[in-house]
Image (tube, rainbow, N blue to C red):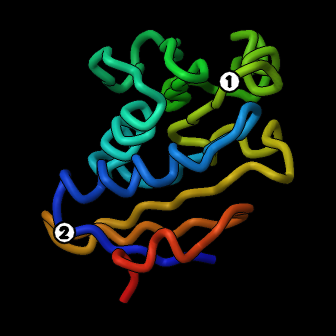
């Protein structure tokens, strides 16, 4: 488990860039966190690292947004889904096991559909500016985050 701290949206984006720079084809990021915790902000950093120029927004009403970069980025927001079957009916398995990287906001709603090697990132709001970012199942080097640990 990695425990990181961010004191601003800019820092959260930088952490996302570090995460994204280390991801490989087929990686799945499963976000957990309350509204406004910073899930989409972290995704913006991941997208930047993949050379995606489009503006990243939460796909709450579209459920999934696809972006082209060094690798495709599939950005899910499953907040409005009622069941795992709803998630699977989106064609999510094709994206999760495809050529890109999947980022899933509100992943706790579809936990049973996630593979065991999904990277779980939980974001906690500590103050209006400060976030604790807990990363579980991180398969890559961890010293890349030393600037953001306490």
- Rounded to the nearest angstrom, the CA distance separating label 2 from label 1 is 30 Å
Q: Position of residue 29 (x, y in %)?
A: 62, 44
Label 2 sits on residue: 7
Label 1 sits on residue: 100
Task: Identify the residue at image location x=86%, y=52%.
Answer: 116
65 or 13: which is nearer to us? 13
Q: Position of residue 35 (x, y in %)?
A: 32, 46
Q: Position of residue 99 (x, y in %)?
A: 75, 19
Q: Position of residue 47 (x, y in %)?
A: 42, 31
Q: Quadrant of residue 88?
A: top right
Q: Quadrant of residue 95?
A: top right
Q: Secondary structure at mark 2?
A: loop
Task: Identify the residue at image location x=74%, y=49%.
Answer: 118
Q: Is residue 97 above or below residue 49?
A: above
Q: How many marks?
A: 2
Q: Secondary structure at mark 1?
A: loop
Q: Is residue 86 left or right of residue 19?
A: right
61 or 65: which is nearer to us? 65
Q: Is residue 114 above or below residue 51?
A: below
Q: Is residue 143 left or right of residue 82?
A: left
Q: Earlier in the sequence, mark 2 or mark 1?
A: 2
Image quadrant containing the N terminus: bottom right
């Amino acid at each position: 488990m990695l425990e990181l701290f961010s004191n601003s949206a800019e820092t959260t984006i930088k952490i996302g860039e570090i995460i994204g720079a280390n991801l490989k084809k087929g990686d799945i990021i499963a976000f957990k966190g309350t509204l406004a915790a910073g899930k989409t902000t972290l995704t913006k950093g991941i997208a930047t690292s993949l050379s995606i120029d489009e503006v990243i927004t939460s796909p709450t009403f579209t459920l999934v947004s696809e972006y082209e970069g060094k690798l495709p980025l599939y950005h899910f927001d499953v907040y409005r889904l009622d069941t795992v079957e709803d998630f699977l009916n989106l064609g999510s398995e094709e994206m999760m096991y495809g050529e890109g990287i999947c980022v899933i906001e509100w992943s706790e709603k579809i936990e049973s559909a996630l593979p065991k090697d999904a990277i779980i990132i939980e974001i906690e709001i500590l103050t209006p500016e400060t976030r604790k970012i807990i990363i579980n199942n991180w398969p890559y080097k961890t010293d890349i985050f030393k600037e953001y640990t306490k």
